[in-house]
Image (cartoon, grey):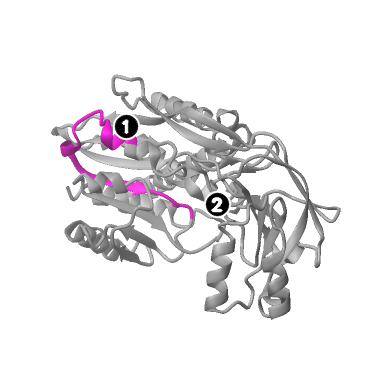
Amino acid sequence: MKLIRQLLFFIFLSNVALAQDIDFARQVINDLCAPEMYGRGYVNNGDEAAAHYLRNQLEKMGVSAFDFNYYQDFKMNVNTFPEAMEVEVDGKQLHPGIDFIVSPDAPSVNGEYDIIYLNKSVIGNPNKMDEFEKADKKGKAILLDSTGFNKVQKEYYQQVEKNPFEAVVIIKLLHEKLTWGVSQNVSPFTTLEILKGIFPSNAKKIKLNITNKLLPKYGSQNILGFVEGKTKPDSSIVFSAHYDHLGMMGKETFFPGANDNASGTAMILNLAQYYSKPENKPDYTMVFIFFGAEEAGLVGSKFYTENPVFPLEEIKFLINIDLAGTGEEGITVVNGSVFEKEFNKLKELNDEKNYLMQVKVRGKAANSDHYYFSEKGVPAFFIYTMGGIKAYHDVYDKPETLPLTEFKDLFRLLTDFVKTF
């Protein structure tokens, strides 16, 4: 009877520990997605606020800093939208992030413009098409709706969207979701993507008040820490994730980035917390890297591989985590077909422990921060979860919608995988 009580007590403690881990992950995601982080972008130094938060977390855990106090600074150009973000169509006010997005490379624009249409009714009618060709489009707004276009018509559409006519704005009507990004450059003209369902039919005028600000040599940062290995301290396993997101589109609209990539950041902090405890001290040195400016084009990780704080040759393996908030359909492993031996280990572990529905293999791809490492010869995986919510690079990627369905099982699989080295 006493033995049963002891077993139940240990099971209780184990469940409490797991609950605390998931609670910690939730808190990290909520903190990183808070309005005070400004979407972890470059308006109001949102990325810097997030970096400071991560530094404090590592310090609190007792994770060691390299000789630069957790920070690795770098610079880049970045286009931002810190002020006005107003679009009005025939007197109807549209809502930024919900009804429309502006292209990340857009310049400032302020004024009211006539709308010239290129849609199925125009491109399928020789007379209307002739009118479109002859119309003076300079200084106007060209509206593009490719619904119903054939291949040849789509090719013409693609030429028009490059704006050879010197229009002030190109408007693209979309049926699908709005997906935003970050740009390091500024275009000579503005592109707007607007949901077709909310655009007034046969609208004549569009009124714009959009303010951009290009920040040359903006200072951002990677955040790094490590736990020294007990038997092989000169060889390391690296866990990484990008902590930045898209930031602000105007004064009021921010992109929280819960799944992308507060979830991956929370996973790396969970791993740092785990390995920082004496009872979990690993054989290899565990390095934890939080990259900045991934959304601007893998800027932070590229900079790191060109300026490593310890030799890249000392990295036994790197595991990059992005989009870790779902998992109903398992995970995908980018570079799985490149590093087959390690992928087979990971898959065998999952099959044995029945953690995730599937571990899907994928080849080489330049789609996250693992890329520049593997290009320099560092064995690396990029792992992301599949299934669940579809919010991505939009205003709907919020903490309250993020299920964290397989967060604990992914954590277990990763820690088991490290033990195989």
Q: Is mark 2 on a helix, strand or loop?
A: loop
Q: Mark 2 points at which residue?
A: 393
412 sits to left or right of 246: left
Q: Where is residue 82 in the image (x, y as percent from the top left)?
A: 65, 34
Please identify the residue farthest to the front as the structure is shown. Answer: 134
199 sits to left or right of 7: right
Does residue 328 sit above or below 191 in this rendering? below
Tell me, yes or no, whether the two marked residues, 2 and 1, touch with CB atoms within 8 Å. no
* Residue 312 magenta: yes
- Is 53 in front, or is 60? 53
> Residue at the spot x=40%, y=63% of the render?
330
Does residue 288 sit above or below 146 in this rendering? above
Which of the marked residues, 2 or 1, is nearer the chain's N terminus? 1
Q: Is mark 1 on a helix, strand or loop?
A: loop
Range of magenta residues: 303-325
> Residue at the spot x=31%, y=24% of the render?
64
Does residue 411 sit above or below 358 in this rendering? above
Q: Is residue 274 visible?
A: no
> Residue at the spot x=41%, y=51% of the render?
408
* Residue 356 magenta: no
- Is 355 in front, or is 141? 141
> Residue at the spot x=69%, y=57% of the render?
137
Does residue 154 sit above or below 75 in this rendering? below
Q: Name the residue under label 1.
A: 276
Q: Which amino acid does label 1 sit on?
A: Ser
Q: Where is residue 11 in the image (x, y as percent from the top left)?
A: 39, 49
Label 1 Cα crowd, 10 Å radius (few <14 / some 14-19 / many 20+): many
- Quadrant of the image occupied by residue 44: top right
Q: Can residue 367 be seen in this view?
A: yes
Q: What residue type is labelled 2?
A: His
